[in-house]
């Protein structure tokens, strides 16, 4: 305060002080949320259910996407949908998805078309270089884990990646694709026991949990809310606090429309998330279940 | 040095509230607005029945600056009001319920519910530029403005604010709103606009048209506030493109007693604190004791 009081003696210096101290954030980030054009260079069917869209950005992002962040994809005249960034390299964006609505259907049929991409949105996941990580994905919950696994594998911090889906038909060449992008193997679980571990991904995590508690392994999970609720309650039972990457309806992606506010926490999925410590959102997840 | 201000009988600890449309559609959204530091919270526009609104994209950033939105008045309907109001009360902050409707009857319907729930004031959305039958179609007709304001004022006892948008007759509409008993005016709403993608040749918003907000509309808002204050010396809340303390101060100098912020939250969640810090220094700069003394000072030449 003394500096300000001193400056007050002179209107000129006060004016300078005001301008210097307060205008710095004014145009910071301007343009960060613009819709950028991208060409869909390939759509690859990995299995009966899962696909990869390969997009080449014609105007690059302002900042390099970090694991945990996502994009909004504009299918012109059709929809605007939130998508995890499965990988990003040399202006090439990989999206791992399944068809479940008009928007994803349009994306699956968009080869050679121009789309819009906004991002990267959300907060990067805070990784600690001291621990090893176990990643758990359910269905399209694998999408945000791909880029994360790639980073952790390169840092030699990856313990294992567990992916659960319904049946072997869904698996197809997903593990091969996963290995090609990340370098890591994928532990597959199927609910109908037709391949890999017999049961849900969370069942396998339950088996591993007592061992995890004794080592310093961190758990990061992504998938539907009920799966994340199980992971979160399991975490509190064993005294660990997993990171959960959440899914929800995101409409604007800018933290303004309020559509993705997580219950009474006041947390915004698109702004503060989509990755949260389970302890912060466990009540919300259990209420939703 | 004081930032306290009274506008339309609302006592505020400082002049910065949120603009309707951002976050105020759920109790969690109200919690978030309070954390952002606003002195009062304004709900999203509430209609009697729930509205799903338009399909995304509903809000996009523009290459020429600012945002274009057509949310389509998406809201959970009047049943949410008691939860929104009780959340604000629990957090000790005044709450203004924004109301949308197609007729006097619909405005009254929501207004009564809001007063019953304990809202501190009502903001009548007479200016939404993108949803047919609501908003600007009413606000551009001074007679309709008068009738709706009068109808709401006659059934409620809390302060009624009229939120008006850019039309050729905004001065006249402002006058009619005041004549009908509005305690204050909220100027201005977003401005009807359009954004076309030249590669795909599609309008970007699903609704095609939207409301332009942010820095591009700020000078328009300054002009409207200046004219309305000059004509009626009314209680005005300025809104449109406030993105730092200077743009807020400009509204106050033009005649606004308070300001609302929406678009700027996209890039800066510290905006309220920054505006307040700047306004405190602005008070010192002009050698006055309170922000009240600076309201309308641009007219005293």
Image (cartoon, rainbow, N blue to C red):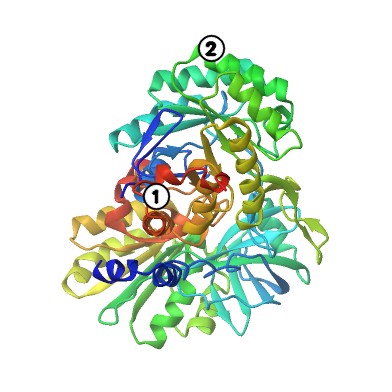
From the viewer's perspective, is B35 left or right of A30? Answer: left
From the viewer's perspective, is A169 left or right of B140? Answer: left
Image coordinates of residue B51 in percent, x first then y, are 60, 32
Residue in the image at 33% along x and 68% along y: A9
In the structure shown, which secondary structural element does the residue marked by tag 1 occupy?
helix
From the viewer's perspective, is B276 left or right of A240? Answer: right
Badge count: 2
Q: Looking at the image, is B262 positioned above or below residue A106?
A: above
Share a chain, discs 2 and 1? no
The residue to which callout 2 is attached is: B154
Task: Decide if residue B19 is in sight here.
Answer: yes
Instruction: In the displayed orientation, state which residue is furthest to the front.
Output: B301
Residue in the image at 33% along x and 59% along y: A203
Of residues B2 and B180, the one nearer the viewer is B2
Image coordinates of residue A131 in percent, x first then y, are 26, 78
How many residues crowd around disc 1 within 10 Å: few (fewer than 14), some, or many (20 or more)?
A: some
On the image, which quarter does residue A127 sit in? Answer: bottom left
How many residues crowd around disc 2 within 10 Å: few (fewer than 14), some, or many (20 or more)?
A: few
The label nearer to you, 2 versus 1, is: 2
Q: Looking at the image, is A189 positioned above or below residue B96?
A: below
Q: Chain of mark 1?
A: A
Q: Are marks 2 and 1 in contact (CB under 8 Å)?
A: no
Q: Chain of mark 2?
A: B
The C terminus of chain A lies in quadrant: top left
Task: Decide if residue B261 is in sight here.
Answer: no
The residue to which callout 1 is attached is: A226
């Amino acid at each position: 305060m003394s500096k300000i009081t001193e400056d007050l003696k002179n209107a000129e210096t006060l004016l300078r002080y005001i301008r210097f101290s307060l205008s710095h954030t004014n145009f910071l980030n301007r343009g960060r949320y613009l819709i950028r054009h991208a060409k869909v260079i390939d759509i690859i069917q990995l299995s009966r259910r899962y696909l990869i869209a390969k997009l080449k950005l014609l105007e690059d992002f302002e900042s390099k996407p970090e694991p945990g962040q996502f994009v909004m994809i504009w299918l012109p005249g059709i929809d605007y949908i939130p998508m995890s960034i499965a990988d990003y390299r040399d202006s090439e964006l990989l999206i791992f998805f399944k068809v479940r609505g008009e928007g994803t259907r349009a994306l699956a049929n968009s080869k050679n078309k121009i789309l819009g991409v906004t991002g990267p949105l959300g907060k990067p996941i805070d990784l600690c270089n001291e621990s090893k990580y176990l990643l758990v994905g359910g269905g399209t919950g694998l999408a945000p884990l791909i880029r994360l696994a790639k980073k952790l594998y390169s840092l030699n911090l990856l313990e294992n990646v567990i992916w659960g889906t319904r049946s072997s038909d869904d698996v197809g060449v997903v593990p091969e694709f996963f290995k090609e992008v990340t370098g890591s193997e994928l532990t597959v679980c199927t609910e109908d026991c037709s391949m890999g571990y017999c049961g849900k991904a969370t069942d396998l995590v339950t088996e591993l949990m007592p061992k995890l508690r004794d080592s310093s392994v961190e758990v990061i999970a992504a998938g539907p809310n009920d799966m994340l609720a199980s992971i979160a309650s399991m975490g509190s039972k064993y005294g660990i606090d997993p990171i959960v990457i959440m899914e929800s309806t995101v409409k604007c992606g800018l933290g303004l429309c309020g559509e993705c506010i997580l219950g009474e926490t006041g947390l915004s999925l698109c702004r503060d998330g989509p990755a949260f410590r389970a302890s912060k959102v466990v009540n919300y997840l259990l209420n939703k279940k | 040095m004081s930032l306290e201000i009274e506008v339309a009988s609302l006592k505020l600890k400082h002049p910065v509230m949120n603009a309707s449309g951002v976050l105020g559609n759920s109790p969690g959204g109200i919690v978030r607005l309070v954390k952002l530091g606003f002195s009062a919270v304004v709900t999203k526009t509430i209609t009697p029945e729930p509205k799903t609104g338009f399909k995304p994209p509903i809000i996009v950033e523009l290459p020429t600056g600012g945002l274009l939105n057509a949310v389509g008045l998406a809201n959970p309907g009047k049943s949410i009001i008691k939860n929104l109001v009780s959340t604000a009360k629990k957090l000790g902050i005044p709450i203004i319920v924004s109301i949308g409707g197609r007729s006097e009857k619909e405005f009254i319907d929501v207004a009564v519910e809001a007063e019953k729930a304990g809202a501190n004031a009502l903001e009548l959305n007479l200016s939404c530029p993108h949803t047919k039958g609501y908003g600007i179609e009413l606000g551009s007709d001074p007679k309709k403005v008068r009738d709706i304001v009068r109808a709401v004022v006659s059934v409620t006892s809390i302060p009624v604010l009229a939120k008006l948008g850019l039309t050729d007759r905004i001065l006249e509409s402002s006058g009619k709103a005041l004549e009908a008993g509005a305690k204050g005016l909220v100027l201005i709403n977003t401005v009807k606009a359009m954004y076309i993608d030249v590669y795909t040749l599609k309008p970007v918003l699903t609704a095609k048209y939207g409301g332009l907000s942010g820095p591009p509309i700020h000078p328009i808002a300054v002009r409207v506030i200046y004219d309305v204050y000059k004509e009626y010396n009314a209680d005005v809340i300025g809104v449109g493109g406030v993105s730092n303390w200077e743009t807020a101060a400009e509204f106050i100098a033009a005649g606004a007693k308070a300001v609302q912020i929406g678009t700027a939250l996209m890039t800066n969640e510290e905006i309220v604190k920054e505006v307040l810090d700047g306004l405190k220094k602005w008070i010192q700069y002009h050698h006055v004791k309170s922000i009240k003394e600076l309201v309308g000072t641009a007219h005293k030449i």
